[in-house]
Image (spheres, grey):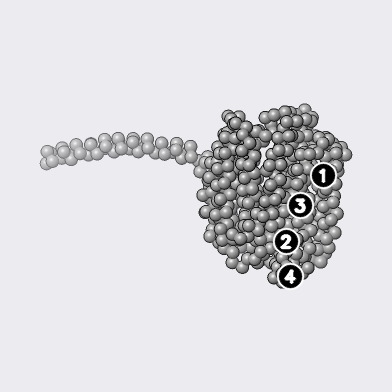
Amino acid sequence: MAAARTPQGAARVGETRGRGRGGGSGRFGGSVRAIGRALRFPVTGAGRGIRKVTHAHGAGESGLGKLIELHAVNGAGDVMITVALASTVFFSVPTDEARGRVALYLAITMAPFTVLAPVIGPLLDRLPHGRRAAMAGAMLARALLALIISGAAATGSLELYPAALGVLVASKAYGVVRSAVVPRLLPPRFSLVKANSRVTLGGLLATGVAAPVGAGLQALGPRYPLYGAFVIFMAGTFLSFTLPRKVDSAKGESFALLAGEGRQEPAARRPGLRTVGAAVTHALGANASLRWLSGFLTFFLAFLLRDHPLTGSSAAVSLGIVAVSAGAGNAIGTAVGAWLRARAPEVIIVFVVAFVLGAAITAAVFFGAFLVACLAAVAGFSQALAKLSLDALIQRDVPEAVRTSAFARSETLLQVSWVLGGAIGIVMPLNGTLGLCTAAAVIAAGWLLTARGLLRSARTGGGGPRVV
C-alpha cells in the first residue's frame, strides 16, 4: 500500500510542478497578449470608433457607411498628391517663376479638363451597371499616376503635367460617380442632404488628418507623399468593390439633360433638368458662382499671400491660416446643412450667396489679414451649405428616374465653374482690393440672376414639373 502510494505522491508532485511551469508560461503568454492588445488598441479602437460612426442610423445596412469610408480614402489620397504638386510647382521656385509654372500647369491640365469634364457625366451615364468598377478604376488610375508623378517630380520632367491632368480627370470622374451613387444607398428615413453631409464630413476629416501627414512625408523627400498616395488609392481600389451590388443597378433610371444638351425629340421623351422646374436651374447657377469663387480664391490668394503674407506671418503660415479657415467653414456649413434638414433650400441659397457677397465686399474695402481669413471661412461655409441645398432641391423636384443622372451632370458643371475661377485667379494682378472686387462682382451677378427665381419658387412651394 505504501509502495503504491509513493508513485501516486510522486505523480502528484510532478503534476504540481508541471502546472507551475505551465502556469508561468501561461502568465507570460497572457502578458504578451495583453501588451499586444495595448499596442493594437490605438489602431483597432480608432477603427471600431470610426466604423461605429460611419455605420450609425442604418448607414451600415444600406451601404452608405462603406461609401463614407471610401470617400475618406479618396480625400486622403487627393491631399497627398496636392501636397506633392504644391511643393513641386508652387513652393520650390520664386514667385514670378511659380506663377508661370502654375499658368503652364493650368494650361496643360485645366484647359483640357474644361473640354473633358462635360463629357464625363454623359459617358458615365452609358455605364450605369459598372459604377463600382468606375470608382475602382478612378482609384487605380490615380495610384499609378502618383508613381509617374513621383519620378517626374524628382527630375522635373514635363510628364508631370499630363500625369497631373490624368489625376484631375480621374478625381472628377470619381466625384461624378459618387454623386450618382449616394441616392441609391440612402437608409430608411434618411434625407439626401443628411447622407451627403455625412459623406462630405468624412472626406473633410480625412483630409484634415492626411494633410499634416503629407507635409511630414514631404519633409523626408518630394516622392514620399506620392508613395503614400499610391498606398491609399490602392486601398480605395479594393474598397470600391465592397459597396453593395445595388450601386451597379440602373433599374428605373433615365438620362438627365442640362439646358442646351437637347436633341431634336419631343419634350416628353427628353427627361432632364429643363422639365423639373426653375428652382433647380437657379440653384445650380447660384452654386456655380460660389464654386467659381472657390477656384478663384484658391489661386489668387495663393500667389497674393506669397508676396504679401498676413501681418506677422510667413507666406506658408499665411496660406495655412487661409486653408484652415476655408476647411473649418466648409465643415461648419456641412454640419449646419445636416441640422437644417433641407428646410427652405431656396431661401438658404439666397441667404448664403448674399452672405458671401457681403463678406467679399467688406474684405475688398477693408483689405486685411483678419478679413481675408474670414472671407475664406465664409466662402467655405456658403459653398457647403448651398451645395447641400441644391442636393435637396434635386431630390425634391427631379423625378427619381433621372435623379441619379441629374446629380452627375450638375456636379460636372460645378467642377467646370471651379476651373474657370482658378484660371481667372491666376491671371489677375496681385492686388488684394482689385481681386476681391472682381470676386464680389461675379458673386453679385450670380446672386442677382438667381435670387428672384429662387424666392419665387419658395413662395409657390416648389419648382413643379414644367415643359419647355
Q: Secondary structure at mark 2?
A: loop
Classify 145 as above or below 284.
above
Residue 67's spot in the image, x, y percent?
A: 58, 53
Label 3: how many Cα within 10 Å (few below 14, some 14–19, many 20+)? many
The residues bearing labels 4 and 2 have C-alpha atoms spaced at a distance of: 12 Å
Q: In this figure, which residue is indicated by the disc labeled 4?
A: 267
Q: Is residue 372 visible?
A: yes
Q: Secondary structure at mark 3?
A: helix
Q: Quadrant of the C terminus?
A: bottom right
Q: In this figure, which residue is indicated by the disc labeled 2?
A: 261
Task: Report the amino acid beneath label 1.
Answer: Ala
Mark 2 or mark 3, which is nearer to you?
Answer: 2
Mark 3 or mark 4, which is nearer to you?
Answer: 4
Residue 62's spot in the image, x, y percent?
A: 57, 59
Quadrant in the picture for residue 400? bottom right
Looking at marks 2 and 3 on the same chain, the residue that comes earlier in the sequence is marked by 2
The residues bearing labels 3 and 4 have C-alpha atoms spaced at a distance of: 26 Å
Task: Report the amino acid beneath label 2.
Answer: Glu
Q: In this figure, which residue is indicated by the disc labeled 1?
A: 439
